[in-house]
Amino acid sequence: MRTLIFIILLGLTQPLLGNNNPDSLLLKIDKRNQTLLGGNQDTKKTLREELEKVFQSKGLVLTDSLWQNIRTVIKTDSEGDSSLSVQIGNSKVKIGVIKSDAPRQKTFKMSYPSDEKKINVTNDSLGKSLVIHSDGKEEVRVGWNGIHVKDGKEEVHVDWNGVQVKEANGEETKVIWGRDSTKVHPKEKNLNLFQRKGMNLYLGLNGLSGTMPEQVVAIYPAPFLATDSELKPTSSRYVSLEFARSATIARGKKSAFKLGYGISFDWYNFMFDHNRVVNKTATATNFQPILDAQGKETLLNKNKLTVSYITLPIMPHFAFSKQSAIQMLGIGGYVSYRLDSWTKTVEEKSEDLVRTNANFNLTQVRYGLKAEVALRHFPDLFFNYDLTPLFEKGNGPQLTGFSFGIKLL
């Protein structure tokens, strides 16, 4: 490793794209844009003014005849790059004219001496790269495309865009100027797997399963009817906003097994298809109609129960390529805590709106099963099924909620 450090120091002490002559001056001109490459460019100055500035910094003078020779080389109609070398006093000036929009034909093949670890510094014809040779395991290259250092299976490349480090195990770390670093696992860098993370919006429908308790009582209105659990299917909506993350548990060549987790906020909206409203009494929760002054039931345009939860979802899933027909398949569960609940009714004739907030003997903590599938060219699908009843046992009808729909975002 000491040899490698010495090589780097030697490379950095050489003038960039220069040679072994300390009095030499190497310049590079973009033929298409007629600008001086490398260093701090001043867009307000012409090419001649930029060259004069560089010449003056070296104690040289850009004569009219030399400037005309440079212009002739720039205007030369050639497919490749051109160069011009002149001697000014004791200084050698070498100017490369690069056709920036042409493909680079020059390659730099590294050759290595014997096991004696001799150091050999060479340049290509235009000085595009300063190549430093050592043994077959170490390599340093300095050029306009950056600095490249190789030590066995480890490599470091520094250029105008940032730093790229390749470790012996194949793991790569990139540091992009102005952006955060990213680390890419060698087995994942070529895979375009489905990612279950970020903010997800679930939209769907919800329903109730179970039966209403049988009541044989000679009172009006009855506390329960068999039809009390009936909902308007398209009006009973489910909404959930989830912030998700995932961790890789196992990885294959074309798939990965991951554990999804996060936090979400859910809203159940049960829109009942009758005029009997969820009602909490001193002993239990039942369904009761709204009676007018004559004791008749009030007809309702809207009659719903809304329950909101904060939820912790756990979603083990298989992630496949985004080019697959099935991109993700997961089965997991969730645990929720009730945040709020209310009923909302709108009378048919008067359109009076009444909202009542209460816990309605709803189960405070719920848990259930969750399934998701991500399909190509189609919205992701989900299905939730509560394993706990909607109302507390013994304090209301034993109904269970479920929901299904699509996942957006």
Image (cartoon, helix red, strand yellow):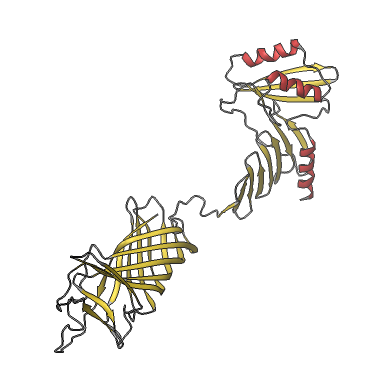
In the displayed structure, does residue 92 sit left or right of residue 327?
right
Coordinates of residue 315 in the picture (x, y in percent): 42, 67
Q: Quadrant of residue 383?
A: bottom left
Q: Residue furthest right?
A: 90
In the displayed structure, does residue 171 sit left or right of residue 382?
right
In the displayed structure, does residue 269 sit left or right of residue 34?
left
Coordinates of residue 130 in the picture (x, y in percent): 72, 33
Q: Quadrant of residue 159?
A: top right
Residue 332 lies, with reference to residue 61, above or below; the image says below
Q: Residue furthest front?
A: 293
Q: Tell me the residue at 41%/53% (across/down).
A: 321
Q: Tell me the residue at 74%/37% (across/down).
A: 132
Q: Tell me the residue at 80%/21% (across/down).
A: 92
Coordinates of residue 361 in the picture (x, y in percent): 33, 81
Of the pair 261 and 191, the residue shown nearer to us: 261
In the displayed structure, does residue 145 sit left or right of residue 321?
right
Residue 116 seen anywhere in this rendered image of the structure: no
Q: Quadrant of residue 409?
A: bottom left
Of the pair 135 and 221, the residue shown nearer to us: 221
Residue 325 lies, with reference to residue 157, above or below; the image says below
Coordinates of residue 49 in the picture (x, y in percent): 72, 20
Residue 152 lies, with reference to residue 344, above or below; the image says above
Q: Tell me the residue at 70%/11% (across/down).
A: 68
Of the pair 152 and 182, the residue shown nearer to us: 182
Residue 333 lies, with reference to residue 198, above or below; the image says below
